[in-house]
Image (cartoon, rainbow, N blue to C red):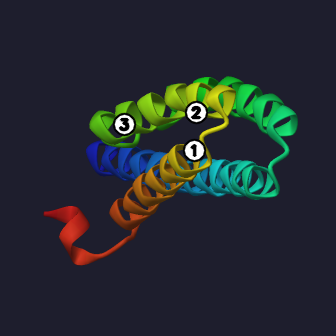
Amino acid sequence: MKRLIAAAILTALIIGICIAGNVIVKEFCKDTNSEIEICRKLCEKGDWEAVDKKVKDLKKSWKTRQRYMSVFVNHGIIDDISVSVSRMPLFSNKKSKSDFLAECAEINMLIDRILGEQEMNIESFF
């Protein structure tokens, strides 16, 4: 009986960690997408000073988020997002609208991929 209780507690703990991880990842993805959307809109307006400021904020927040997300998400995707985020200031400093918007689209695509992998379905378990 004691083993059954221990197994039930461990199972509940694992399920709780999985659910918490899923919630954290989805929230971080939503926040990052929001920041990218703001950067994209500022770029389209041509407000490069505001873009530079927002990109600095994005780099800072992404550095924090990636530490937590790397526990639950494929490291390759996290690394790809980190590379794209680190390239954004280069394009904003050059005022290269097309390259900057391409990086925004790349990050959005990678975040969508993360969200797709976080979905609960039968393929997730096998």
Q: Give the amino acid at mark 3.
A: Asp
Query: Above or below — where is 72 with respect to 25?
Result: above
Relative depth, front residue between 98 and 31: 98
Q: Residue 25: x and y, percent?
A: 54, 50
Query: Above or below — where is 123 with respect to 27?
Result: below
**Quarter location, residue 122:** bottom left
Distance from disc 1 to disc 3, alpha carbons, whole Å, reads 15 Å
Q: Earlier in the sequence, mark 2 or mark 3?
A: 3
Distance from disc 2 to disc 1, alpha carbons, whole Å, reads 5 Å
Q: Is residue 31 left or right of 5 when viewed as pictured?
A: right
On the image, numbered disc 2 is attached to which residue? 91
Disc 2 to disc 1: CB gap under 8 Å: yes
Most distant residue in the left direction = 126
Q: Residue 82: x and y, percent?
A: 46, 30
Q: Quadrant of the C terminus?
A: bottom left
| Disc 1 versus disc 3: nearer the observer | 1
Helix or strand or loop: what does disc 1 sit on? helix
Helix or strand or loop: what does disc 2 sit on? helix
Rendered image: mark on residue 100: 1
Query: Above or below — where is 31 with respect to 126?
Result: above
On the image, numbered disc 3 is attached to which residue? 80
Q: Give the amino acid at mark 2.
A: Phe
Helix or strand or loop: what does disc 3 sit on? helix
Q: Is residue 10 left or right of 16 when viewed as pictured?
A: left
Distance from disc 2 to disc 3, alpha carbons, whole Å, reads 17 Å
Most distant residue in the bottom direction = 122
